[in-house]
Image (cartoon, helix red, strand yellow):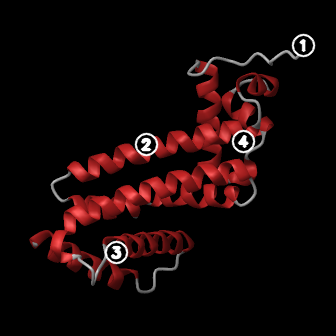
Amino acid sequence: MTQTRRMGVEGSTRRTLFVDAAEALLRSEGYMSLSARQVAARAGLKTQLLYYYFRTMDDLVLDVVRRINARRLQKFEEALAAPEPLRALWELNSDPSGAAMSAELTAMAGHREAVRTEIVQAAQHFRALQVEAATRLLGKQAGKDYPAAGIVMIAIGVARTMVSESSLGLTDGHREAQMIIERLLQAFSKG
């Protein structure tokens, strides 16, 4: 008879400490620093305890990804409820901290299949929500000449590029791009 391994309780304080530590390491040092030993040290717990709460490091990373996605969806809902939802959505997509974490998770996904699968599914869901919102917010202004899916993709691409380049100190053309985006936001808000 095969015995199943006993696992720590979901939502326990120690489990949360491991997820907090893993997320903090991803933010401060990048995915290459993410080892059981580093996470445990950051959490102030023993490495062996990590495997009581998570079967694998991928399981820990998946919890981090799910937490980040839940926060992103919450911020998305808040942006939609803002007085200027298109501007709030632009600000959400151009937030440097979100873009930096996205880059780390994308890099990690290239090496971990389970993480890649989770990230792609979450990204597809989030993209669909953004397209739906843009379709509703833009109404007739978008239409078939300017499909909402294309507008969302361009906005995300520009936002990520600006954040990524700014982190390197490369800002050529950013002011001009931001000026164009500001004009578009004003035009779309007037309807």
Distance from the alpha carbon under mark 3 to that under mark 4: 34 Å
Q: Which mark is residue 71?
A: 2
x and y percentages locating residue 80 in the rendered image: 25, 52
Label 1 belongs to which residue? 1
In space, the residues marked 2 and 1 are separated at their CA atoms by: 42 Å
Answer whether labels 1 and 3 touch (C-beta < 8 Å). Answer: no
Q: Residues within 10 Å of mark 1 (few under 14, many from 20)?
A: few
Sequence order check, earlier mark of 2 and 3? 2
Q: CA distance from mark 1 to mark 3?
A: 57 Å
Q: Secondary structure at mark 3?
A: helix
Side of 14 relative to 48 (left or right) = left
Camera-side mark, 2 or 1: 1
Residue at the limit of the structure toward the left, as seen here: 190
Give whichever of discs 2 and 1 has the lower sequence position: 1
Left or right? Give the position of 40 relative to 18. Answer: right
Q: Residue at x 36, y 55 (%)?
A: 129
Say what secondary structure mark 4 lies in.
Answer: helix
Q: Which residue is mark 3?
A: 151
Query: Given this view, does label 1 or label 3 mark the residue nearer the observer?
Result: 1
Which residue is denoted by mark 4 in the rendering?
Answer: 58
User: How far separated are the C-alphas under marks 4 and 2?
Assistant: 20 Å
Q: Amino acid at mark 1?
A: Met
